Image (cartoon, coloured by chain):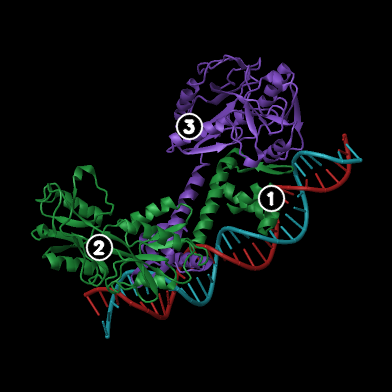
Chain colours: A purple, B green, C cyan, D red
Amino acid sequence: MRTFVAVVDTGQFQAAGDRLSITQQGVSKRVAALERELGVLLLVRTARGVRLSVDGQAFLPHARELLRVQDRAAASVRPERRALRVDVLNRRIAAAGLLQSFHQQHPEIALDVLTLPVLADGDDALTAVRAGTVDLTFRALATTAGQAPSGLRTGPVLHERHDLLVGPQHPLAARDRVTPADLAQHPIWMFAMPADSEPGAYYRELAEAFSLTIDIVAPNFGNEALLDELAGSSRLATLVGRGSRYLWPTSYDLRRIPVVDPAPVFPLYAVHVEQHAHPDLPVLLDYLRERCGTDEAGDGLWLPAWTALNGPAPWRA
Amino acid sequence: MRTFVAVVDTGQFQAAGDRLSITQQGVSKRVAALERELGVLLLVRTARGVRLSVDGQAFLPHARELLRVQDRAAASVRPERRALRVDVLNRRIAAAGLLQSFHQQHPEIALDVLTLPVLADGDDALTAVRAGTVDLTFRALATTAGQAPSGLRTGPVLHERHDLLVGPQHPLAARDRVTPADLAQHPIWMFAMPADSEPGAYYRELAEAFSLTIDIVAPNFGNEALLDELAGSSRLATLVGRGSRYLWPTSYDLRRIPVVDPAPVFPLYAVHVEQHAHPDLPVLLDYLRERCGTDEAGDGLWLPAWTALNGPAPWRA
DNA sequence: TATAGGCACAACTGTCTGTTGTTCTTAGAG
DNA sequence: CTCTAAGAACAACAGACAGTTGTGCCTATA
């Protein structure tokens, strides 16, 4: 591909060979191999060089695009000058949506979105942030009770509210809102999560606070299977983040019902290094701070005891 | 790349090898080579298979994108099921803009836009259309006097009007419109074009009809150089299609002045095969017919004598 | 008609890729 | 705690492949 593009750019095999530091015959072989593989003639050989055939002209922009993608791919793992890397835990949650709108507002910033696995020890992503291989991650700061992990900086991003997700036959399906107390009589299905992970600790404490029955879905066949189960069940319900994005067929007729009085919120913090940060990180942090400011104060919210903050607080070390 | 993606998809080297019909050791070597080339660890080897490293997770979407682009590139030259290929003569002219809006309206149709060189014999693109390597091209139908070339089908697309392009010091710079008669006293610069090509015949006849002085710009340093010359000159002017797209620095202060009474129009026809056409071609033809219908009738227009049609006519064989 | 620019073919060589055979590590069972 | 089996890496080797040198052919231009 690169050879073909070089030939097109220079207009002749010899010059392309000089640019690529191979001989003219080598170029000839490479182009011939590409043409044989594709089964078409890409270049029309003339007495004074070479010009594109019809197929070559159609192929050329695709070849250039391929080289661009290849360069971007290589750049994505080069330590210096790689794209900004952000861990969103899970592409369905609100943080992913936040990052998506950030990308729309700043399309010029190259962004790689990761979902690092939640391991039992919980600090896998934090280790990556410390090591400098990830620039920012989102945490609930359970284990550190609102304090920044050592060597890292943190700031509140949002208080994620919850919806109850139920099928049309569920007893609460017609409600326009429910309270945590209402949920005490209905089993809540959730996927298994490590007990000492932040979400694990959060939902365990939520269940204790309101005497909820949380059933672990096993085996875990994925979200699609869970949604399918919910659609046909008159008993099953699950909790989802308000900002999370789930899609289901319209025939499922699932309902999202806000949970209020109090509204359990999942506190999401951005965690990142302070020194030697990625040059684009400050832009993202500014964006998050701005969005964070619009989050209302903590009236009628429920947060677990280990959360140090009961409302948005200033960013701090 | 393909091997790396296969490993990620299957979760283990052996299964990836089976899918690619090579041994587990071969997969191991390929991935190791990729990692060595990139200088990072992409996959974390575990006792029960393999999982993505942080770098691997950032790299994966780029790798998938690369494979997609590669498949598209290969598909662009596969005779069956390739993208719709349209020759627009020149990316600056109105036909290119027309095709761009077609693409915006039908983003689902894969489109390859070509600019086949205008050769002296003039029918190079027509040959490609007959051969089936190009699906549609735009012509003025000079040589055939409005008749469809044998075996091909044709229809009017638009009557392209002209603007006079001049710098701020040109005598006509302040006019809001000019007539062809006005131009008789001012030299018109144009690039050399083959005398028996359709644009060549068109502008020769236009010059004769209104006693214009057409100077050939030589040597041809490209459009940028021409625009630069125009900007500083009090004598030079050129004719450009109304729908053509030229960009210049604001400091040039060039003006586009409509040419009217009569308005010389360049008649553009779509030429394509009738039988065994590309499945997407009818969609493009429908789009062109629709746009064509909005073109006003031929009052105050000038067309060369060899143009059989003096206004839009129905599409015909 | 002579010349020179430019590409393809042929023969050869060194590297590289993929294979077989084997070892090392580790999760899970007994 | 030990055994077993799954799964990846290492080593040695054979075949393929890419790139080099040398040469011939074609054609635009003088």
Question: Disc 2 residue type?
Answer: Phe
Task: Label 2: state its secondary structure.
Answer: strand
Percent x, y for residue B275? 46, 72
Checking the image for residue B266, the label placed there is 2
Earlier in the chain: of badge 1 and badge 2, it is: 1
Give whichever of A111, B44 is nearer the camera: A111
> Which residue is denoted by mark 1 in the rendering?
B13
Count of marks, rendered view = 3
Q: Marks 1 and 2, how far apart in space?
A: 62 Å
Percent x, y for residue A287? 46, 27
- The answer to whether residue B102 shows anywhere in this view is yes
- The answer to whether residue A16 shows anywhere in this view is no
> Which residue is denoted by mark 3 in the rendering?
A278
Look at the picture and state if B298 lies above or below D24: above
Give left or right: position of A195 versus B295.
right
Question: Disc 3 residue type?
Answer: His
Residues marked 3 and 2, same chain: no
Q: Quadrant of residue A7?
A: bottom left
Look at the picture and state if A30 lies above or below A290: below
At horizontal 44% and vertical 34% (from top left) the residue drawn is A105
At horizontal 75% and vertical 31% (from top left) the residue drawn is A235
At horizontal 71% and vertical 35% (from top left) the residue drawn is A230
Q: Dots 1 and 2: beta carbons under 8 Å?
A: no
